[in-house]
Image: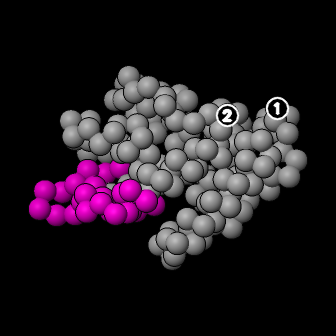
């Protein structure tokens, strides 16, 4: 498989809690920009000239802001998703998608590159709930932000 962005350097944090915080900052940026429309069901979908702006999810905001630095030539792709990047970036993007859905163990497995079955044998999951309730973004973006901030803090306190 040809990865469109295999050359992108992994500048994302190496701790899940820090990655969530970066993602929330990037999301706040795209929320304020008329160039973007937040849609948690779309990784990245390019703008339609004369129509809607680029659609991005939580992980898509990281793609746009932290990874591709809003490079116009890099953002001409019609669709960008995790598989367009090499590992570990792809794993981190999939982890963000899991965390935003409240799937904490799945997010950790994706982040560290393990299966969920192996995860408990490899890292200490003491004190880390398998799932957390995260308010869906389309219901309350403010509560979504708050819930993910609490998720990041929970992970930080557990060493992740």
Mark sitting earlier along the chain (1/2): 2
User: Could you say which is closer to the camera, residue 116 or residue 146?
Assistant: 146
Q: Residue 129, position in %: x, y?
A: 80, 56
- Residue lying at 73% horizontally and 49% vertically, measured from the top left: 155
Magenta-colored span: 28-54
Labelled disc at residue 54? none
Question: Do the residues bearing badges 1 and 2 touch, measured as CB atoms within 8 Å?
Answer: yes
In this rendering, the answer to whether 85 lies above or below 75 is above
The magenta stretch spans residue 150: no
Q: Look at the image and name its color scheme.
A: one colour
- Asked if residue 42 can be seen in this view, the reply is no
- Residue 34 vs residue 1: left or right? left
Image quadrant containing the N terminus: top left
The residue beneath circle 2 is 112
Q: Residue 26, position in %: x, y?
A: 44, 51
In this rendering, the answer to whether 127 lies above or below 77 is below
Q: Secondary structure at mark 1?
A: helix
The magenta stretch spans residue 37: yes
Q: Residue 133, position in %: x, y?
A: 68, 67
Image quadrant containing the C terminus: top right
- Residue lying at 69% horizontally and 40% vertically, measured from the top left: 109
- Residue lying at 31% horizontally and 51% vertically, measured from the top left: 45
- Residue lying at 35% horizontally and 37% vertically, measured from the top left: 68
- Asked if residue 2 can be seen in this view, the reply is yes
Q: Quadrant of residue 7?
A: top left
- Residue 157 vs residue 133: left or right? right
Distance between the Cα atoms at labels 1 and 2? 10 Å
User: Could you say which is closer to the camera, residue 35 or residue 1?
Assistant: 35
Q: Quadrant of residue 40?
A: bottom left
Q: Secondary structure at mark 2?
A: helix
Q: How many marks?
A: 2
Labelled disc at residue 122? 1
């Amino acid at each position: 498989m040809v990865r469109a962005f295999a050359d992108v350097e992994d500048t994302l944090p190496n701790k899940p809690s820090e990655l969530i915080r970066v993602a929330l900052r990037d999301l706040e940026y795209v929320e304020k920009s008329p160039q973007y429309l937040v849609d948690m069901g779309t990784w990245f979908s390019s703008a339609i000239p004369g129509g809607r702006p680029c659609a991005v999810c939580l992980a898509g905001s990281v793609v746009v802001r932290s990874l591709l630095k809003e490079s116009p030539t890099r953002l001409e792709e019609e669709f960008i998703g995790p598989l367009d990047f090499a590992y570990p970036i792809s794993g981190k993007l999939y982890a963000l998608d899991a965390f935003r859905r409240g799937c904490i163990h799945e997010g950790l497995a994706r982040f560290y590159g393990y299966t969920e079955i192996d995860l408990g044998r490899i890292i200490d999951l003491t004190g880390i709930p398998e799932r957390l309730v995260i308010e869906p973004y389309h219901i309350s973006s403010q509560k979504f932000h708050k819930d993910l901030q609490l998720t990041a803090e929970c992970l930080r306190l557990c060493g992740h």
